[in-house]
Image (cartoon, coloured by chain):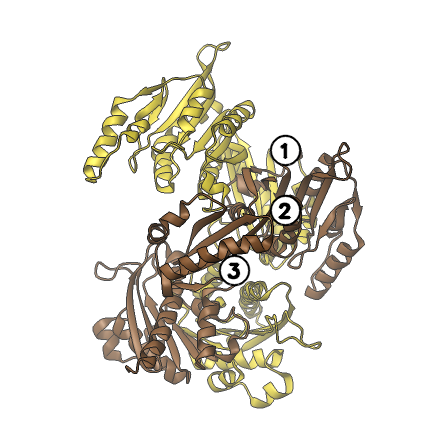
Chain colours: A yellow, B brown
C-alpha cells in the first residue's frame, strides 16, 4: 500500500507554523511499513485542494489529509474530499451529540456553524475526536470490477497536533494494521550513527551497499560532524525484515569500526559519552571559552547526567583562565589563549578545581572579529584530560560564529569519546 | 510572481526530521510579498522528483528546491532539475576550488565524489555556499516568444538549515528583490520583536491591525517566549513602501511599550541584553543548574560579548553550589536546591566569585525524573542580581527536558532585561 499525505492550511504556506504533523504521520506510517512517496501542503482554496486530492488518488492507495475540518467558512477539506469521492454530506447524530456534550462540559457558547463539523460524507467511517469537536473521517472507495475490494482510501484528520496524534494512535492505527495485514508487507529499519567521518568518505566506503538494488536500502544522512546511515528492509513478516537488515548493519559496523557510536535511533552522541563515563565510573567537567557553556549544555541534556557531571566553568577572559584554572601567565603571553598549550593547562586545572576525573577544554576564535593571519577565525583548540592523560587537537572550522561554535561542541564530544576509549583500550593492553 | 517549494529527501518522508526549511522559506517569501500555493516533499527518486518539478513549472513562475545537493549517489536534485530544464552539467572551476579549499582548511579527507558538487547546469547563476560544499543554483528559462523575458526560475538550495538560511538571506533575497522590482512591485517589511507576552495577548491588542485589509499586512509569529510581528507593505518604490510601514510599526511600539525589545531583523534578545550591559558599563556572570551552560551559550553568541562577560559556572550539584557560590548548607536543607532562596544566594555568590556587576542564576527540575508533588517537573526558579539588588521569579514550564531548559534560558534573558531596565529607571527617579 502506497500512502501520501496532504496538509491543508494557508498558515503553513505563510510559514506561520512548522508542519510537525508531516513528520509525525510520516514516522507513524513508516513504522507501520507503509511507504509514502509524496507530502503536499496546500492552502484553504477549494480548486487547488481538489486538484491535489485528485492527483494523489492517481498515484497512491491511501491519501491522508490533515487540517481544514474546523467550523469556519475557510475550513473546506471535508466538503472538497466528499466532492472528489462523489459523496453527499449527511448529518451524523452521534457526532452532533458529541459536539454538544463537548461544549456543555466546558460551559462554552456553541454557535450553529459548529454543527457543520457533524456533517459526514455518506457511508464514511467516523473517527471520534476525544480532544476536540471535529471528527475524523475515512472514505473507502470500492472498485466495481473487483467485487467489494477497496482500492482507494481517503482519511481526514484534524489539524491541531494533540487532536491529530491521539486520533491517529487510538483510531487510525488499528484500522491501518488491519488493512496492512491484508497486504502482507512489513517494513523494518535501523540507523547506524557515525562520528568523525565525512558523508563523502562514508559514501565511498559503503558505495556497494548504497547502490545495491534489492529488498534492503542503505541511505546516508549528513549531520553536524556526524553521518547517520539508515538501513531499511521490507518483507512479509517483521522477523523476515529484521533478518535482512541485521547482516547489513553488521557489515557497516565492521567497515567503520569505532566511528560507529550507536545503532539506536534515540541515542545521541552526548548520551554515548555520558554512558562511557558511567560505565567507567568517571566524573567529568567542562571548561569553555568560545563555546561558552554549550558543551555542558549538551551533556546536561542527558537525563541522569548528575551522576557524572557536578560542575564546570565558562572561562571567557584570560584572567578567568588564570584565576579559576591556574593557566600560567607565561603560557598565555608566549602562546596566546588560543593554543594547544593553553587548552592543555585549562583541562588540567579544570579537573583539579572541579575534582573531576575527566575534563574537556575549548579555546578558539569564533569570529566575526578577533582573527589574525596566524590565527584566523575558525581556529579552535580542544583539550581532553582523562585521569591526567591529556590529548589536544587543532581544528579549522568554517561558517559564521554560531556554526563554528556548534561544530566545536560536536568535535569536543567526538574527541572526548575517542580519548576515553583509547585510555581504556591502552589500559587493557597494559600500556600506560 | 507565484512561487512553489519542493523539499527533496527520503528522511522527510520517513519522518526522521521535521521540515523546518519549509516554514523558513515560506515566511521569507511571504515577507518578500511572493505568494506560495504549494509545498511538496518528495524522496530521493529521480522519476518522482522529475514529475514534481515538471508539475510545479506548469503552475508556478518560481520553483525553489531544497536538499539533494550532497556528494552521494542518492543526491540527484541538480541532475534532475538540469534535465527538466534541458541543461548539461558542466564543471565550475570556482566551485571546485572552493570545495578543495573547504577540505584543506578543515584538514579533512576529500574524495572524488565531492567534485560532483562542482558540476553546475550550463548557463546557471551560482550561489556560493559559505557554510558548506554544495553551491546553490538558479536556472532561468527564457520564453522564446517574448525575447529575453525570463518566464520561469528554478532555484536549488542545500538542505542543511544553516547553509540554506545563510544562502537565502545573503544571496537569494537580493536576486528576488531585483526580480520583484522588474514586476514594478517593491516589498518592504520590518519586524517588531516582543518578549514576555503571549501570542494570543498580542493578537488581541493588535487585532484591528492584523485584520485590516490594505497595502500593509501585519502578521504575528510565535517563538520561544517571544512573538515577532512582521509588518509588510507593497508599493511601486521602496520609499513609498517604507512610508506605509513606518506608522504601523510606531503604532505597535506605542501599544506594546517596553515589551518591544527591537525592530531590527538581525537583533536577538541576547544582543539586546548585551547592549544594555555595555550601555550601562556593567559586567555579567551566569550560574546555571538545570540550564547547564545554555544561558552563557546564548550570551556568548553575541560578537564582542568579551567586553561584559568574563566567566561563569555550571553548578549542577549541591556541593558545587556551596563550594563555588557559597550557598548555605542550611538553605539547601531547608528550602532545597530548587527554591527562590537558593537562586538568590546563587546569584549573590556568583557576582562575588566572578567579580561581576550583574548575575543570573537558574535552578529547576527539567525532568523526566526528579519531580515530586510539591516540586513537579517544569518548576524553575530564576534569580537576577543587578548591583546587589536581587529579583527572583518562579516558573512552571511545560514540555520535555529540552523544551523546559530552552524555555528557562529565554525566560532568564527576559528577566535580565527587565531587571536592568527597572534598576536604571528607579535610579533615574531616585528610588533605591
Query: Badge 1 sits on which subunit?
Result: A
Q: Are marks 1 and 3 on the same chain?
A: no
Q: Is residue A227 something one can see in this rendering?
A: yes
Q: Tell me which label, 2 or 3, sits earlier in the chain.
A: 2
Q: Is residue B218 above or below residue B253?
A: above
Cα–Cα span, label 2 and label 3: 20 Å
Q: CA distance from mark 2 to mark 1?
A: 48 Å
Q: Label for residue B180?
A: 2
Whether residue A358 sits left or right of residue A216 in the image: it is: left
Residue B98, image x, y percentages: 74, 59
Say which chain tag 2 marks: B
Dot 1: element: loop
Residue with the mark numbered 1: A214
Quarter where residue A77 is shown: top left
Towards the viewer: B41 or A426: B41
Q: Are marks 2 and 1 in contact (CB under 8 Å)?
A: no
Q: Is residue A267 left or right of residue A106?
A: right
Instruction: List the residue tagged with mark 3.
Output: B265
Q: CA distance from mark 1 to mark 3?
A: 50 Å
Name the quadrant containing residue A116: top left
Q: Position of residue B64 (x, y in %)?
A: 62, 43
* Percent position of residue A145, x then y: 51, 9
Q: Nearer the viewer, mark 1 or mark 3?
A: 3
The mark closer to the camera, 2 or 3, is 2
Q: Nearer the viewer, mark 2 or mark 1?
A: 2
For the point 49% across and 49% down, the residue is A264
- Residues at marks 2 and 1, common chain? no
Q: Chain of mark 3?
A: B
Determine the image quadrant of residue B362. bottom left
Q: Is residue A161 left or right of residue A363?
A: left
The answer to which of A261 and B212 lies nearer the viewer is B212
Amino acid at each position: 500500500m502506497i500512502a501520501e499525505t496532504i496538509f491543508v492550511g494557508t498558515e503553513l504556506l505563510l510559514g506561520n507554523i512548522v508542519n510537525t504533523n508531516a513528520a509525525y504521520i510520516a514516522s507513524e506510517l513508516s513504522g507501520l511499513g507503509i511507504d509514502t512517496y509524496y507530502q503536499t501542503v496546500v492552502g484553504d482554496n477549494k480548486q487547488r485542494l481538489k486538484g491535489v486530492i485528485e492527483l494523489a488518488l492517481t498515484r497512491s492507495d491511501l491519501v491522508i489529509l490533515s487540517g481544514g475540518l474546523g467550523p469556519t467558512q475557510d475550513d473546506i477539506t471535508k466538503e472538497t474530499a466528499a466532492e472528489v469521492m462523489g459523496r453527499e454530506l449527511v448529518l451524523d447524530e452521534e457526532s452532533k451529540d458529541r459536539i454538544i456534550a463537548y461544549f456543555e462540559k466546558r460551559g462554552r457558547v456553541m454557535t450553529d456553524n459548529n454543527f457543520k463539523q457533524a456533517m459526514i460524507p455518506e457511508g464514511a467511517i467516523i473517527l471520534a475526536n476525544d480532544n476536540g469537536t471535529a471528527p475524523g473521517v475515512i472514505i473507502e472507495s470500492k472498485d466495481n470490477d473487483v467485487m467489494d475490494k477497496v482500492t482507494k482510501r481517503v482519511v481526514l484528520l484534524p489539524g491541531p497536533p494533540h487532536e491529530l496524534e491521539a486520533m491517529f494512535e487510538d483510531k487510525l492505527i488499528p484500522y491501518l494494521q488491519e488493512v496492512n495485514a491484508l497486504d502482507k508487507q512489513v517494513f523494518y529499519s535501523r540507523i547506524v550513527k557515525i562520528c568523525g567521518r565525512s558523508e563523502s568518505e562514508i559514501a565511498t566506503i559503503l558505495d556497494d551497499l548504497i547502490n545495491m538494488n534489492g529488498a534492503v536500502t542503505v541511505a546516508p544522512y549528513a549531520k553536524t560532524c556526524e553521518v547517520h546511515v539508515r538501513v531499511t528492509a521490507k518483507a512479509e513478516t517483521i522477523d523476515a525484515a529484521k533478518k535482512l537488515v541485521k547482516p547489513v548493519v553488521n557489515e557497516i559496523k565492521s567497515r567503520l569500526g569505532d566511528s560507529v557510536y550507536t545503532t539506536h535511533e534515540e541515542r545521541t552522541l552526548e548520551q554515548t559519552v555520558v554512558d562511557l563515563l558511567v560505565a567507567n565510573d568517571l566524573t567529568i567537567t567542562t571548561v569553555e571559552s568560545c563555546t561558552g557553556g554549550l558543551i555542558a549544555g549538551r551533556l546536561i541534556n542527558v537525563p541522569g547526567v548528575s551522576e557524572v557531571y557536578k560542575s564546570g566553568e565558562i572561562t571567557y577572559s584570560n584572567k578567568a583562565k588564570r584565576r579559576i584554572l591556574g593557566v600560567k601567565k607565561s603560557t598565555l603571553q608566549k602562546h596566546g589563549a588560543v593554543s594547544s598549550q593553553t587548552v592543555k593547562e585549562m583541562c588540567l586545572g579544570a579537573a583539579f578545581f572541579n575534582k573531576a576525573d575527566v575534563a574537556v577544554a575549548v579555546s578558539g576564535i569564533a569570529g566575526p572579529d578577533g582573527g589574525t593571519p596566524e590565527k584566523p577565525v575558525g581556529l579552535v583548540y580542544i583539550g581532553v584530560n582523562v585521569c591526567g592523560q591529556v590529548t589536544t587537537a587543532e581544528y579549522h572550522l568554517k561558517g559564521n560564529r554560531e556554526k563554528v561554535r556548534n561544530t566545536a561542541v560536536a568535535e569536543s564530544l567526538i574527541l572526548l569519546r575517542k580519548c576515553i576509549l583509547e585510555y581504556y583500550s591502552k589500559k587493557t593492553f597494559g600500556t600506560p
